[in-house]
Image: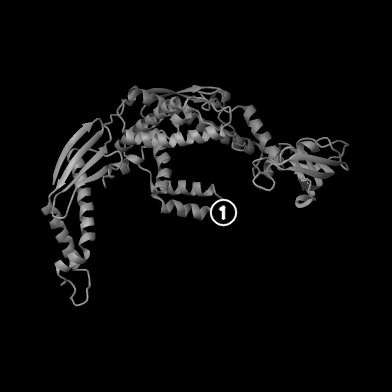
Amino acid sequence: MQVIETSTEGLRHEFKIVVPAADIEQRVQTELVKLAGRVKLPGFRPGKVPVSLMKQRYGKSVMGEVLEGAVDEGTRQALEERNLRPALRPKVEVTSFDEGKDLEYKVDVEVLPEITAPAFDSVEIDRPVAEVTEEQISAGLTRIAETRRKFEPVTEERGVETGDVAVIDFEGSLDGAAPSEEMSGKDFRLEIGSNRFIPGFEEQLIGKKPGEHVTVSLSFPEEYPSPEHAGKPAKFEVDVKSIEQGVVPEVNEDFAKELGFEDLEGLRNAVKGQTEQEFGRVSRLRAKRKLLDKLAELVDFAVPQGMVDLEFDQIWQQVQQSIETGGDDNPDKNKPEDELKAEYRGIAERRVRLGLLFAEIGRAENVEVSQEELNRALIAEARRYPGQEQQVVDFFRKNPQAIENLRAPLFEEKVVDVILGKIKVNDTTVTPEELARDPDEDEAVEAKPADAKPAKGKAAKSKAAAETEGADAKAADTDAADTGTGA
């Protein structure tokens, strides 16, 4: 086998590989002999089928397998002899082959760069930390109490207010038609402000007293899931029968015991602990962001453009979707496409570079994700889909790439831990509000007790978030790339 390197440009290498015809023929003969020992043909004893007959019947399929094996072997040899690690699967093109002649093919491959981790003893970052205040504990207790409120009949004479439950009978008709059973109800308990009904319905009940009748006129939203209702005008005849108001329980010893705690102090400690955990999570995110920014400053090596292309394609797909659904306030909406692509391609390159650095550090530090850790991540993912847990588990077990998507963030966090243990980290005390504020946007990240509901994120993520998110995106992929020499 002859291996000739025909071109080298940066991380891209091209080879011309020639496998002599005699070598191909010998491989074919060897495989036919092996096959003859297993095949049963009428009129021949096992293992006594002539090779000439085997070649007549199975020659083409055996030749195909031999050629595929020869290409794999030659490609692997070309890389191993030069100590090259492919970034992606090499591209192979057969340039010449006929039966009885040499096999010639060319290999085009991008390889992983030589990566040297920075001297971590000279790296220093600040990590913001915040103390849980008494005000936050009290606010957390109040939020818990509000979730436990009970509705009681309103005794004074007044109309419906936001937050009340209005007990109503209603009959609805669509676009002037007769009342519809599916648009009607009896003794329906509607919490005003819950947005359970279509927009505009609940607002028209505000101020109405028990015994009053109101005609609610509105239109179904254009995006309503039922096509026969979407965009159509509707009318509801509504009778307000009674009003109930929410009564928030007092946060005291009895309330704590109802929640399963021994006393109020135990409940307070639980709220404080949950808030501290959330503060710790946000603090780590801030430290990780600073770490990635610092590493991006310290390392500068060429990255395989094929990997950058794949990463950019994924980012760009998300950007386009975000622009389509984000509305007019999306910061990318009115930017020229060329400018946007240049910005996000830079982010893709940063992600790949940091990912390769993480992979190298993880390899040097023997970082591994155990099967137990993967199993825990899989269980957590399955729990996100109540009632479909088994289907989720089956999907991941049948899809190696899906499992890899679970492994990658686990690997990332373990490498982050390794690096944080090697550099100097200065804890700086900040207020909870400062901790929650996004460093690149005047917008807070949720840092509340676990009982609080998370705020809805913006339709379009900031570029800074895109830079941080998935910064190790390629770290877990490189192990597979190292062995991905097959054609």
Mark 1 crowd level (few <14, some 14–19, many ≥20, 10 Å Cα): few
487 sits to left or right of 399? left
Q: Is residue 130 visible?
A: no
Label 1, on which residue?
A: 387
373 sits to left or right of 383? left
> Which one is nearer the viewer's eye here, 265 or 255?
255
Q: Which residue ends up furthest to the bottom in the rendered image?
A: 43
Q: Position of residue 462 (x, y in %)?
A: 50, 28
Task: Quadrant for residue 453, please give it.
Answer: top right
Residue at the spot x=66%, y=31% of the render?
139
Q: Position of residue 375 (x, y in %)?
A: 44, 49
Callout 1, which amino acid?
Gly
Task: Quadrant for residue 345, please give it.
Answer: top left
Residue at the spot x=40%, y=41% of the render?
408
Q: Which color scheme does this rendered protein use?
A: one colour
- Residue at disc 1, secondary structure: loop
In the displayed structure, would residue 133 be above or below residue 213?
above
Q: Position of residue 256 (x, y in %)?
A: 68, 40
In the displayed structure, would residue 172 be above or below residue 128?
below
Residue at the spot x=27%, y=39% of the render?
86
In the displayed structure, would residue 397 be above or below residue 259?
below
> Which one is nearer the viewer's eye here, 317 or 484?
317
Q: Is residue 313 visible?
A: yes
